């Protein structure tokens, strides 16, 4: 992956790369601290990876792309781990298919923590040396990669526990963030027609899919200052919105019928009242909170039902500084495509983003489980339109 030059924002005390490495790696293990050993292995669906796989894969990234090529006579912790923890890098070789990650009773959780300790020790030794700019950028990419997996860890843990019949609480207060919005009343923000610049400004780290800053023309539009709430979405449910075919994309309506979708993921209708599974267990739906775990199909149908639409990713980025954001990844009405002049890096790192630029929709913003400092207005997240295990929500435009 190509990245911009790493220029970290100033802190009260500026972090060294070694300090940042320790902080990021420690956060992954902190996320897993509340888990029981059995929780580490579960894979309810193919889109969800077992927590122990995330811990192994992020470690494999540093071993494979940083330690093995750059440290003379580096000894792999276990040569078989390349097959176990390679995710989708065809250049690196064969791998366990994604849907079989839950079948890996071995290596054990204890083995994986030993693997992490082994790699961390050598990485910390490396970080004490003078490093080239290219190597520093690659390590920074590895840290941002691990932060991506920290968010996936949280979403996967929620899916694992939220589909356990006992609906157990995760209850990690350290990672809990308030999901309420700072603007309880909605305002319509006017963006005038004009030519605007989109993409990374080159200040700090970015992924290669943010590069290629370019101009776009936008017609004038209005965009909501806040996200759609649970109370507003329940109005759609009560109006039989899931059965009104005129509001749905054809594929979306097929998805609703084939999967018997009647409400957002994790919602349960019990004795005339809506509940939803949260990291604190099963709770009554908070009517003022932004609706969460919504597919693109649902978001688009809801917007159409309201007589509005979803913003494009370009509209979202132009309006971003005026929006109440950060509690939900927001579906946009933009397909995930490369920016003008996009070029994939050579080798395995070039497989990071470009190969996924088809059949996916862009999400913007961040969520309550996004790691600190891992969001920016040019960040482009992307998922297939039916997926909703991520913390996804709705913002309206017209």
Image (tube, rainbow, N blue to C red):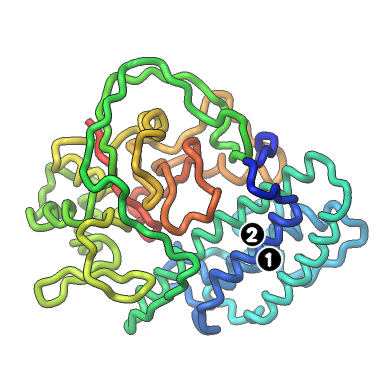
* Residue 393 seen in the current view: yes
Q: Is residue 255 above or below residue 376?
A: below
Residue shown at the point (39%, 49%) measured from the top left = 329
The residue to which callout 2 is attached is 24
Residue shown at the point (69%, 55%) measured from the top left = 20
Of badges 1 and 2, the one in the foreground is: 2
> How crowded is the residue under tag 2: few (<14 C-alpha within 10 Å), some, or many (20+)?
some
Between marks 1 and 2, how big is the CA–CA gap? Answer: 25 Å
Q: Is residue 2 above or below residue 54?
A: above
The location of residue 4, given as percent across then percent down, is 66, 34
- In this view, the residue farthest toward the right is 72
* Residue 359 seen in the current view: no
The residue to which callout 1 is attached is 83
Residue shown at the point (92%, 57%) measured from the top left = 72
Asked which quadrant contains residue 225, the reply is: top left
The location of residue 187, given as percent across then percent down, is 23, 36
Q: How many marks?
A: 2
Q: What's the mark number on residue 112?
A: none
- In this view, the residue farthest toward the top is 194
Q: Earlier in the sequence, mark 1 or mark 2?
A: 2
> How crowded is the residue under tag 1: few (<14 C-alpha within 10 Å), some, or many (20+)?
some
Q: Secondary structure at mark 1?
A: helix
Q: Secondary structure at mark 2?
A: helix
- Please state, as top left, top right, bottom left or bottom right, where the N terminus lies in the image: top right
User: Nearest the camera: 133 or 334?
Assistant: 133
Marks 1 and 2: CB-CB under 8 Å? no
Residue shown at the point (56%, 43%) measured from the top left = 353
């Amino acid at each position: 992956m190509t990245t911009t030059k790493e220029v970290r924002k100033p802190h009260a005390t500026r972090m060294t790369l070694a300090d940042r490495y320790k902080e990021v790696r420690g956060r992954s293990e902190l996320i897993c601290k509340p888990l029981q050993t059995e929780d580490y292995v579960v894979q309810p669906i193919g889109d969800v990876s077992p927590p122990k796989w995330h811990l192994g894969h992020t470690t494999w990234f540093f071993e494979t792309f940083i330690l093995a090529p750059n440290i003379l006579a580096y000894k792999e912790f276990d040569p078989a781990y390349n097959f176990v923890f390679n995710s989708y890098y065809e250049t690196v070789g064969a791998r366990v298919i994604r849907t079989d990650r839950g079948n890996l009773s071995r290596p054990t959780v204890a083995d994986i923590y030993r693997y992490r300790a082994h790699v961390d020790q050598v990485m910390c030794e490396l970080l004490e040396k003078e490093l080239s700019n290219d190597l520093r950028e690659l390590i920074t990419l590895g840290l941002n990669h691990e932060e991506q997996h920290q968010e996936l860890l949280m979403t996967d843990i929620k899916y694992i526990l939220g589909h356990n019949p006992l609906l157990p609480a995760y209850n990690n207060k350290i990672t809990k963030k308030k999901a309420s919005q700072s603007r309880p009343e909605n305002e319509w923000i006017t963006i005038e027609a004009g030519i605007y610049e989109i993409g990374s400004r080159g200040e700090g780290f970015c992924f290669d899919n943010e590069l290629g800053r370019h101009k776009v023309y936008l017609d004038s539009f209005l965009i909501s200052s806040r996200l759609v709430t649970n109370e507003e979405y329940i109005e759609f449910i009560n109006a039989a919105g899931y059965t009104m075919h005129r509001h749905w994309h054809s594929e979306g309506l097929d998805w609703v019928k084939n999967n018997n979708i009647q409400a957002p993921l994790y919602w349960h209708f019990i004795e005339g009242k809506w509940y939803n599974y949260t990291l604190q267990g099963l709770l009554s739906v908070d009517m003022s909170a932004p609706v969460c775990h919504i597919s693109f199909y649902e978001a688009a149908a809801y917007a159409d039902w309201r007589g509005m639409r979803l913003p494009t990713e370009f509209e979202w980025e132009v309006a971003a500084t005026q929006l109440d954001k950060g509690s939900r990844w927001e579906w946009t009405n933009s397909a995930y495509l490369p920016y003008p002049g996009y070029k994939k890096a050579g080798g395995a790192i070039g497989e990071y983003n470009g190969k996924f630029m088809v059949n996916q929709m862009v999400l913007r913003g961040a969520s309550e489980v996004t790691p600190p400092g891992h969001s920016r207005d040019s960040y482009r997240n992307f998922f297939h339109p039916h997926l909703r295990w991520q913390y996804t929500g709705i913002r309206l435009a017209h």
